Image: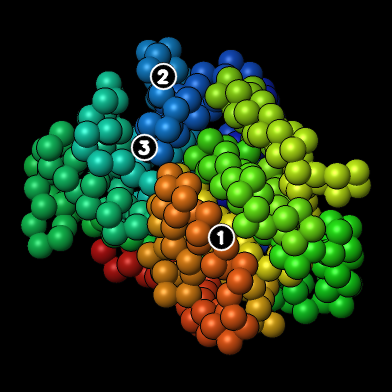
Amino acid sequence: MRAYDGAWVGWTGSPDDAPPPFSTDDMDLVPVPLSAEEIALYYEGFSNATLWPLYHDVIVQPEYHREWWDAYRAVNQRFARAAAEVAAENAVVFIQDYQLQLVPQLLRELRPDLKIGFFLHIPFPPTELFAQLPWRRQILEGLLGADLVGFQRAGAASNFEALAENFASATLVDETLVLDHGREVLARSFPISIEVEEVAKLADDPDVQQRAATVREEVGSPKYILLGVDRLDYTKGIGHRLKAFGELLAQGDITPEEAVLVQVATPSRERVEAYQTLRDDVELAVGRINGDYGRIGHPAVHYLHSSYDRPELVSLLLAADVMVVTPLRDGMNLVAKEYVSARSDLRGALVLSEFAGAADEMGDGAFLVNPHDIDGLKRTMLAAMRLAPDEAEQRMKLLRDHVLSHDIGRWATEILTALRAI
């Protein structure tokens, strides 16, 4: 935002009144208010109990409620009006994520002079899943209000193109969607990334490196530390990871003295019932593994249900011998890229789900795995732990070559350049 001198239109994060527009830290902020009822219906309801599970392969069954849809539509209209009021003539407006999929068309109706882009940070489902949505046509028409619709993976862009043709009267011509009235919409993949320099700088900090050494001591100085860092979300495959690790212990392939799993589970959407159930299930699994295989002062699984600041996170990345990223479905997964950015020592191994968007870019150096295949996941975790140092270095070089040359700045430049060129 600082680089492009724009205004950020967004929710404040708390219910009810929002302050008037203000500037801070070289950014112009335009707050949009949400009531407590709208948070329940629009955010926790339609966004996170309808769209989120639907777009993530129906891992949890989506709920379809008309009052949730009404709130979603009303909030999207409010965001569109706010953007229309502050945007300069012929400005570029860049709309973010699944909570605001109606805004492109609503904004175009208010301000046809604007150039409008949209980026979806999560997966976009195939026809057989998206077709379940009672408001499928409205969502597609909302997205088609943009000039450019960006996705994490090429397959998601293809899904959108097929659905736009099936349900929204668009025609695909030379890789461009043409609407009835002749306007063109481009759908493309733009894999997002991270601020590589920020992570690399922290990884080189002597205090962070010392903290990483302390972490190893605190978990018992095992030969191998396996690390998972996720929001506590049912899409992240935390249960599958725990099951595989528990079975490795049960079969004697590893011992608690040889290997421990550190699982950071950042609290998420704690008022949504599916997330409450997930927390219970994860903590029950952790308790069983530690009850069976841990000993006083030395649990097999170190489970941390809390958030961590950046230096502490990077210290964990440096301490980990194996980073285990096993989502059942993920738009990208930036933790995988953070791990690689931190490992200038060319040590460590990345176990990565093939269902994460990051697998498209990192498959040459990572150990790709199907997290539903528990036996395969176990074999892969063992292979990553017992990787020869020279192969580990070769794999990490491949990963770092890509991640370091494809940072968040490159992503922003590519997608905004494509939008301006339309």
Label 2 is placed on what type of residue?
Glu
Q: Position of residue 101 (x, y in %)?
A: 38, 38
Image quadrant in which the C terminus is located: bottom left
Marks 1 and 2, how far apart in space? 35 Å
Q: Which residue is identified by label 3? A: 57
Q: Position of residue 118 (x, y in %)?
A: 38, 50
Of callouts 1 and 2, which one flags the residue occurring earlier in the amino acid sequence? 2
As helix, strand or loop, the secondary structure at mark 3 comes to loop
Q: Residue at x 48, y 66 (%)?
A: 367
Marks 3 and 1, how far apart in space? 25 Å
Q: Residue at x 44, y 62 (%)?
A: 368
Q: Position of residue 108 (x, y in %)?
A: 31, 42
As helix, strand or loop, the secondary structure at mark 1 comes to helix
Q: Nearer the viewer, mark 1 or mark 2?
A: 1
- Tell me if mark 1 has few (under 14), some (14-19) or many (20+) residues whose alpha carbon lies within 10 angstroms of its own: many
Label 1 is placed on what type of residue?
Met
Looking at the image, the residue that sits furthest to the front is: 252
The image quarter containing residue 273 is: top right
Q: Position of residue 233 (x, y in %)?
A: 57, 37
Residue 63 got which mark? 2
Marks 3 and 2, how far apart in space? 14 Å
Of residues 203 and 293, the one drawn nearer to the viewer in this rendering: 293
Side of 356 where 149 appears, left or right: left
